């Protein structure tokens, strides 16, 4: 009986390990794997990381993207009552658009932090504007989409954007 249980455990572990995603897998295989989530770089979220290309000066969508052009407020419950409620902004009109983002951009960065204390959790005291350039290659995080390991880091993989045509 012990031998059977050990063999069953070994077979289960082997089968899970043999199907585990790895950085050597192609992007197509990772995108099709329901056990992983690919965390897209923030700058590519609007166009989609796998719908993006790069020039020397821009990041562009390869195909047009469905974009909201008009919203309306929908009130749920009574936001002013004790029970509460909320206001939701719902898209009422869409348009297909080409998305373009300048690679060179300005960012606000903290240059001086307040030390953590009872009155502060270490907020930024001074800000500075810097010019940065989005890369052509992004280090993309791949995380688990399964049970107790949900959103647990698995590995990073480089996503190299193709040249725009």
Image (cartoon, rainbow, N blue to C red):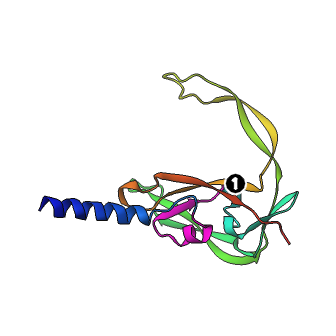
The image shows residue 36 at horizontal and vertical percentages of: 49, 63
- How many dots with numbers? 1
Residue 115: quadrant of the picture: top right
Nearer to me, 123 or 99: 99
Q: Name above or below for residue 138 compared with residue 98.
A: above
Reply yes or no: does residue 37 show up in magenta.
yes
Farthest residue, direction left: 1
Reply yes or no: does residue 51 show up in magenta.
no
Nearer to me, 129 or 11: 11
Residue at 25% in and 60% down = 9
Q: Name above or below for residue 164 compared with residue 150.
A: below
The image shows residue 11 at horizontal and vertical percentages of: 30, 65
Residue named by callout 1: 138
Residue 48: quadrant of the picture: bottom right
Residue numbers of the magenta segment:
25-41
Residue at 52% in and 66% down = 75
The image shows residue 93 at horizontal and vertical percentages of: 68, 77
Side of 16 where 75 appears, left or right: right
Q: Name above or below for residue 161 compared with residue 124.
A: below
Side of 131 where 120 appears, left or right: left
**Image quadrant where one finds the N terminus:** bottom left
Residue at 69% in and 77% down = 94
The image shows residue 117 at horizontal and vertical percentages of: 51, 21
| SS for callout 1 | strand
């Amino acid at each position: 009986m012990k031998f059977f249980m050990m063999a069953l455990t070994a077979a289960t572990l082997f089968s899970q390990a043999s199907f585990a995603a790895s950085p050597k897998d192609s992007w197509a295989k990772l995108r099709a794997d329901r056990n992983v989530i690919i965390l897209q770089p923030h700058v590519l979220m609007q166009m989609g990381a796998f719908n993006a290309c790069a020039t020397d000066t821009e990041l562009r969508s390869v195909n047009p993207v469905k974009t909201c052009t008009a919203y309306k407020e929908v009130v749920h419950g009574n936001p002013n009552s004790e029970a509460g409620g909320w206001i939701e902004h719902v898209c009422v009109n869409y348009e297909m658009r080409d998305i373009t983002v300048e690679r060179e951009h300005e960012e606000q960065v903290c240059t001086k932090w307040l030390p953590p204390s009872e009155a502060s959790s270490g907020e930024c005291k001074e800000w500075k504007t810097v010019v940065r350039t989005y890369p052509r290659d992004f280090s993309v995080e791949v995380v688990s989409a399964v049970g107790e390991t949900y959103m647990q880091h698995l590995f990073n993989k480089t996503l190299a954007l193709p040249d725009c045509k």
